[in-house]
Structures are given as C-alpha cells and as structure tokens.
Image: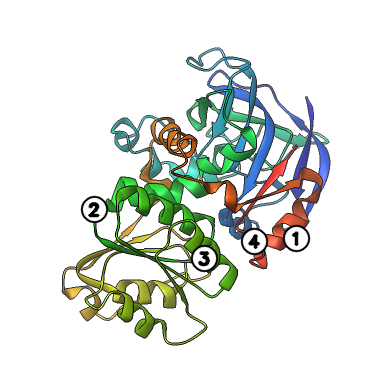
Amino acid sequence: MRITAAVLENAGGPFTLQQIDLADPGPDEVLVRVHSVGICATDLEFANFFPTPAVLGHEGSGVVEQVGARVTGISPGDHVAMSFTSCGDCPLCRGGNPAYCRQFDAVNFSGRRPDGSSALSRDGQPVNGHFLGQSSFASHVVAPARAVVPISKEVDLGVVGPFGCGFGTGAGAVLNVLRPEVGSSLVVFGAGAVGVAAILAARVAGCAVVAAVDVNAGKLDTARLLGATHGVNSADGDPRELLTAIAPHGFDVAIDTTGREDVLRLAVESLGPLGRCGVVGIGPSEQMSFEWRSVLNGRSITGIIGGSSLPQVFLPKLLDLHAAGNFPVDRLITRFPFTQINEAVAALRSGEIGKAVLTL
C-alpha cells in the first residue's frame, strides 16, 4: 500500500514527507494506522547516524487494520500503543525481560526485519525502517505483534504514544528498577519528558524529597508543578553545593537522563552511602569516568533500557495511574500536525517544549 512517511534522506538532515510503499504484514506482524506519534530524544540522536534513507519514530499509537496469520490477542479495530520489540526466544525474553533481549540491537536498530527485508520501499528500493519495532513517523506501520499493546478505546490516542518509550522509560526506572522506599530522597538530572515522568513516578512511590536538576528554568518550573520538591538550576551556581543543601548526607537514588559524562559523574557523586544511580539517557558522551572513591561506599550504577518493562504489563499500569490523575503527563505534551515534524524537532532541540506529539 502507498503511505505517507517522514523520510530522513541524510543523517542529521531534515525530514521530508514523501509517498512510499508499505508491504503487507507478515505472519507475526500487524498493520497499524497511526493516529499520533511522539518525538523522543532517541529519534533525534539516531537521526545523526541511522542508515539512510530511513523512517524513524517509535512512540506511535493508532488503530489496527490487519493482523498476520499467527497473531493472537490483537484484532482489526483494536486501539494500540506501540513500544520496542524483542526476539521473544532468548532466555531474557522468556524470563520477562524483553528490554534486555540478546537480539535487542538487531531487531530494533538494524533498519530491517530479522530476515534482512524491509516493509518499506520507494521506487522498488528498500527504505530502512523497523526502528524500535515501528518507524511510526508515518501514516501506517507494519510492526511485530510483540511491539503492540492493545489499550482501551476510552484512552486518548493523542496522549498514549509516549507511554511506549519516554514516559515509560522514566517511570519504569523508578518503579521497576530503583524502587525507592517511602520517605526516601531522589534526584533527577534532566527535566525533560523522561525526567519528569521519573519525578511523577517518585511521587507515586512516596519519595519525600524529589529534586530536579536542569539548566532550563521553564523545565524546572514544570517539574515543580508536577511534583518536584526542589528545582536546581545548575547554571545559577555550583550544583554540588545546591544539592548538598537539599540532601546533606547524599540522595538515596539518582537518575541521569542526559547521557553527558559530567552530569552522570555529578549524579553518582550526589549519592549517599549505598545510593543507587540509574542511567537512562542517550546523549553526546560515549564514555563515562569516575574516581574510585565515587563508588567505594556502596554506591551502584545501573543502566536501564525502556524502563526495564514488559510493555504489555507496565504500559496499562501507567495508563491506569494516568486515568486516576496520578501521572498527569498531558501537561508536558505539545501537539503538532504531522506536516510540521521539522518545526516540532526544532522546538524540542531548543528546550522550548517537553514532549512533541505529531497528529495525523
């Protein structure tokens, strides 16, 4: 079928809306008509080096139009959110940890299906896609059934897409991995969509002190509005001193969403004894370094992919929290028509907005 997609022609370049071809779903795949799709920092990072031409996008939501012969539990007409995919066969997948699938990079970042084919083509030539199981910067998606989560038709499809990555990543880091105790202290570095989702989850977990660190005053205002007890603008002074004033003995939990070496070092050094730091950010730094004293007193550092979640289980739980008013991420979202994808990307890069959602 012919679809409209935002094609990345050259790494680092703008997206261009084009008509390309989409193959029918395979036996373990589904065809989804995309209603809306969030733009994530991961899209922006991979746009710099993903093999082109390509279609990115991995926070999609929509309506199922067709299912493959072996697909069960999903039917045409179902409303769905989409998340990352996994092989489903390795010990980690079978153990309920698909975010750490042994084939994660191959099935999410190769641009192709496991058999080397692409469902996307243009003038008979393949277009790289299948990005995190979706490539949902498009009017339609062919996705593995494992990447699709059926949701209630009462849920606003214009909100749910980012639950599949950004919101789920931040919340899952807190609720699935770090699991702070009631009354504990937590600090989040980077008050974007992922960071604020972590802040909201920290309030759900019962943290008494929830600090947000950023250089954007507007983002810090939003973080405080949505549950942060403290906001630290690291452009206003030495953030170490400001954080020590909040937690003199160090924080129990820290989360880095920035992917910056200097920020992650600060996150680890802000911890108290036995403190735990979760690393969720994909950013500019390829290497991280610490003085050995930074971890000698029982501090630990753990990497977290996709909120360490099983999307079919965790995403509905987050939606229940949202419906109950306990995960009000709507305030982070700015909607753009799909035709304004480049304007939305520019607004995100400038820090003007927290989460862009494209509507089709």
- The structure residue drawn at horizontal position 57% and vertical position 37%, both measured from the top left corner, is 160
| The one of 360 and 248 positioned closer to us in this rendering | 248
Q: Are discs 4 and 1 less than 8 Å apart at CB?
A: no
Label located before the other in sequence (1 or 3): 1
Residue neighbourhood size for the residue with mark 2, other residues' Cα within 10 Å, grouped as few (<14), some (14–19), many (≥20)? few
Q: Mark 3 points at which residue?
A: 283
Cα distance, mark 2 to mark 3? 31 Å
Residue 48: numbered disc: 4
> What amino acid is found at the position of numbered circle 3 in the picture?
Gly
**Residue 332: x percent and y percent?**
58, 53
Residue 182: numbered disc: 2
Cα distance, mark 1 to mark 3? 18 Å
In the picture shown, does residue 5 fall above or below 53?
above
Label located before the other in sequence (4 or 1): 1
| Residue 97 seen in the current view | yes
Label located before the other in sequence (1 or 2): 1
**In this rendering, which labeled residue sits more in front, label 2 or label 4?**
2
